[in-house]
Image: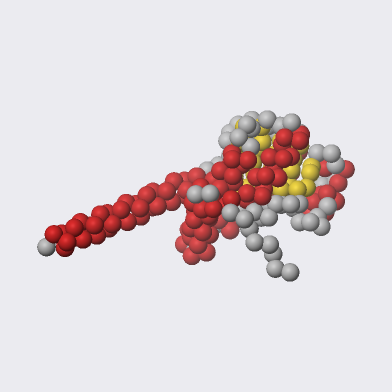
């Protein structure tokens, strides 16, 4: 009887811990949804540099617009395609390549959010920048800021979230793809918070 009682208490404790874990995950997801829906600060403060993390629509366009408005003196496009050039970037966004020369740098090494953070940190230190405006999708911003604070703790980081066009549509909330994207990004954020993003990444297949 004593063994059964002890086993029952252990099972109840385990069930309680599981329920608490699910509650915390649910509350964390609500916080994540609120963070993902954040908008840029207003009014916009100037920063030393602007860093764009590639991988989604309108990120580079937003960074270039902010640069043209004089919000910073330099811009880094982190995770740019290895073959991309400033001329390609200018042409894609209706600008003159000469207007970007000396003001826009293309980072070609990053292959992950942690890689973006390392690339941005190296650029910021090389350029002597104390403040960076970070441009990426709103749902990606919490993870990007987490990795950047680890890689560049001495700098002031200002989030500038971008909402991709598909997520601006009223019907987006009813699409399974939207929730799959958000849940997937939340799980990646939890993994990054737990340090899993620091694990070595296997090399790409030949």
Return the x and y of residue 3 as percentages of the image width and height.
17, 61
At 68% from the left edge and 55% from the top edge, which residue is drawn?
111
Nearer to me, 132 or 6: 6
Nearer to me, 46 or 114: 114
Return the x and y of residue 112 as percentages of the image width and height.
64, 54
Return the x and y of residue 67 as percentages of the image width and height.
74, 38
Against 117, residue 179 (above or below) is below
- Left or right for 19, reference 125: left
At 85% from the left edge and 46% from the top edge, which residue is drawn?
96
Q: Is residue 173 visible?
A: yes
Residue that sits furthest to the left in the current view: 1
Q: Is residue 63 visible?
A: no
Nearer to me, 39 or 204: 204
At 78% from the left edge and 47% from the top edge, which residue is drawn?
106
At 75% from the left edge and 48% from the top edge, which residue is drawn?
107
For the rendered model, the colour scheme is secondary structure
Which quadrant: the C terminus? bottom right
How many numbered circles are shown? Answer: 0
């Amino acid at each position: 009887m004593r063994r059964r009682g002890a086993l029952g208490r252990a099972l109840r404790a385990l069930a309680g811990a599981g329920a608490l874990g699910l509650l915390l995950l649910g509350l964390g997801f609500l916080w994540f949804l609120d963070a993902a829906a954040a908008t840029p600060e207003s009014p916009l403060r100037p920063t030393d540099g602007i860093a764009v993390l590639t991988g989604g629509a309108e990120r580079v366009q937003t960074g270039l617009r902010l640069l043209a408005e004089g919000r910073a003196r330099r811009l880094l496009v982190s995770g740019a395609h290895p073959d991309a050039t400033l001329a390609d970037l200018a042409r894609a966004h209706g600008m003159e390549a000469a207007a970007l020369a000396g003001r826009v740098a293309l980072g070609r090494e990053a292959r992950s959010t942690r890689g973006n953070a390392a690339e941005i940190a190296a650029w910021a230190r090389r350029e002597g920048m104390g403040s960076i405006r970070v441009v990426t999708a709103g749902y990606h911003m919490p993870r990007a800021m987490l990795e950047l604070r680890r890689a560049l703790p001495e700098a002031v980081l200002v989030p500038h979230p971008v909402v991709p066009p598909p997520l601006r549509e009223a019907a987006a909330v009813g699409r399974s793809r939207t929730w799959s994207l958000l849940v997937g990004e939340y799980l990646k954020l939890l993994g990054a918070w737990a340090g899993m993003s620091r694990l070595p990444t296997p090399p790409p297949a030949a």
